[in-house]
């Protein structure tokens, strides 16, 4: 059977449910800027059968709102951007890296959230 490796996106509810210490951009800061059309790209991957694909979606990478506001030109150019998205499209402004808890050191694990900087 044919398989593919997928990297996963998190919706707002998924980010809310993540445990551990948040590093970089704080969880509340990310959550207050997320709309139902925002996703966060995770570092987790897994292998899946091609038959499990339900369909195709469009995910556009964009700088975070804070980065856009820091640059006046981009802020003006992006006003109303969400309303211009194609139907069914999503926006990804952040990536995250999950560091699992270490039972030996009693650490709770951490979640590093990184704003998208415009470079892939």
Image: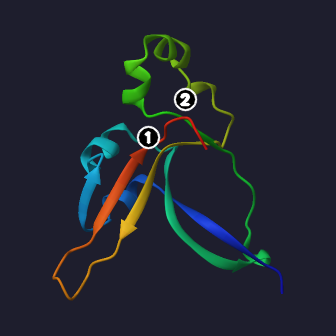
Between 27 and 115, the one lying in front of the other is: 115
Between 54 and 113, the one lying in front of the other is: 113
Q: Which mark is residue 100?
A: none
Rendered image quadrant of residue 97:
bottom left
User: Which color scheme did the rendering employ for the protein?
Assistant: rainbow
Tell which residue pokes out farthest to the right in this image.
Answer: 1
Decide: is 100 above or below 22: below
Decide: is 95 above or below 64: below
Position of the N terminus by quadrant = bottom right
Q: Are marks 1 and 2 in contact (CB under 8 Å)?
A: yes
Q: Earlier in the sequence, mark 1 or mark 2?
A: 1
Q: Residue at x 44, y 24 (%)?
A: 68
Which residue is denoted by mark 2 in the rendering? 82
Callout 1: helix, strand or loop?
loop
Q: Residue at x 49, y 11 (%)?
A: 73
Which residue is denoted by mark 1 in the rendering? 35
Q: Residue at x 65, y 44 (%)?
A: 88
Q: Is residue 53 left or right of residue 74?
A: right
Q: Dot 2: few (<14), some (14–19), or many (≥20) neighbours within 10 Å?
A: some
Q: Position of residue 89 (x, y in %)?
A: 64, 42
Q: Position of residue 92 (x, y in %)?
A: 53, 44
As measured in the structure, the alpha-carbon distance from the residue carrying label 1 to the one carrying label 2 is: 9 Å
Q: Position of residue 55 (x, y in %)?
A: 75, 60
The mark total stands at 2
Between 73 and 78, the one lying in front of the other is: 73
Q: Is residue 96 left or right of residue 85?
A: left
Q: Dot 1: few (<14), some (14–19), or many (≥20) neighbours within 10 Å?
A: few
Callout 2: helix, strand or loop?
helix
Q: Position of residue 103 (x, y in %)?
A: 22, 87
Q: Residue at x 19, y 76 (%)?
A: 107
Position of the C terminus by quadrant = top right
């Amino acid at each position: 059977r044919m398989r593919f490796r997928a990297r996963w996106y998190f919706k707002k509810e998924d980010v809310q449910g993540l445990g551990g210490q948040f590093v970089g951009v704080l969880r509340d800061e990310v959550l207050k800027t997320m709309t139902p059309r925002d996703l966060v790209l995770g570092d987790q991957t897994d292998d899946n059968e091609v038959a499990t694909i339900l369909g195709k979606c469009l995910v556009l990478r964009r700088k975070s709102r804070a980065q856009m506001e820091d640059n006046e030109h981009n802020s003006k150019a992006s006003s109303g951007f969400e309303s211009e998205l194609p139907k069914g499209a999503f926006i990804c402004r952040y990536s995250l890296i999950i560091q699992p808890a270490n039972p030996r050191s009693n650490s709770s694990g951490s979640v590093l959230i990184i704003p998208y900087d415009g470079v892939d």
